[in-house]
């Protein structure tokens, strides 16, 4: 039995080091939140942050447009004519579809 124990490396005889190794392997590969899941979540977080930046930019543009429409009657009329095809009573609107 002593011959068998003589061939075991010293780091395997240390119960604290062995416990730390087993714990590290368990957390890294076998846990519910292992390294692979963490990488996926990090990538998902980056995608969500990009989406947040895009939508924040869009909200700012819409607020700017809304402020412009509230303060300038000419821009309000322009938006009504272009987006909603509104017209005055004595006008005719011709829509030309370019393909």
Image (tube, grey):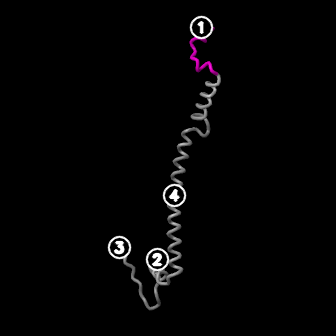
Q: Earlier in the sequence, mark 3 or mark 1?
A: 1
Instruction: Measure the alpha-carbon separation of dots 2 and 1.
Output: 89 Å
Residue at image mark 1: 3
Instruction: Measure the alpha-carbon separation of dots 2 and 3.
Output: 16 Å
Residue 80 image offset from top left, x and y in percent: 48, 80
Residue 17 image offset from top left, x and y in percent: 61, 25
Most frequent secondary structure within the magenta stretch: helix
The secondary structure type at the circle numbered 4 is: helix
Instruction: Measure the alpha-carbon separation of dots 3 and 1.
Output: 90 Å
The secondary structure type at the circle numbered 1 is: helix
Question: Mark 2 or mark 1: which is in front?
Answer: 1
**Pointers 2 and 1 in contact (C-beta within 8 Å):** no
The secondary structure type at the circle numbered 2 is: helix
Residue 34: within the magenta?
no
Residue at image mark 4: 51
Q: Earlier in the sequence, mark 2 or mark 4?
A: 4
Q: Nearer the viewer, residue 32 or 65?
A: 65
Quarter where residue 34 is shown: top right
Residue at image mark 3: 98
Residue 13: within the magenta?
yes
Of the numbered discs in the image, which one, if any, rests on residue 83? 2
Q: Quadrant of the C terminus?
A: bottom left
**Pointers 1 and 4 in contact (C-beta within 8 Å):** no
Q: Earlier in the sequence, mark 2 or mark 3?
A: 2
């Amino acid at each position: 039995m002593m011959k068998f124990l003589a061939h075991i490396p010293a780091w395997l005889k240390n119960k604290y080091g062995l416990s730390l190794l087993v714990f590290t392997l368990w957390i890294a590969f076998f846990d519910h939140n292992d390294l692979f899941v963490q990488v996926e979540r990090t990538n998902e977080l980056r995608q969500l942050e990009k989406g947040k930046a895009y939508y924040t930019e869009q909200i700012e543009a819409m607020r700017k447009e809304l402020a412009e429409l509230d303060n300038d009657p000419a821009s309000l009329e322009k938006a009504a004519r272009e987006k909603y095809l509104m017209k005055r009573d004595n006008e005719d609107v011709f829509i030309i579809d370019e393909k």
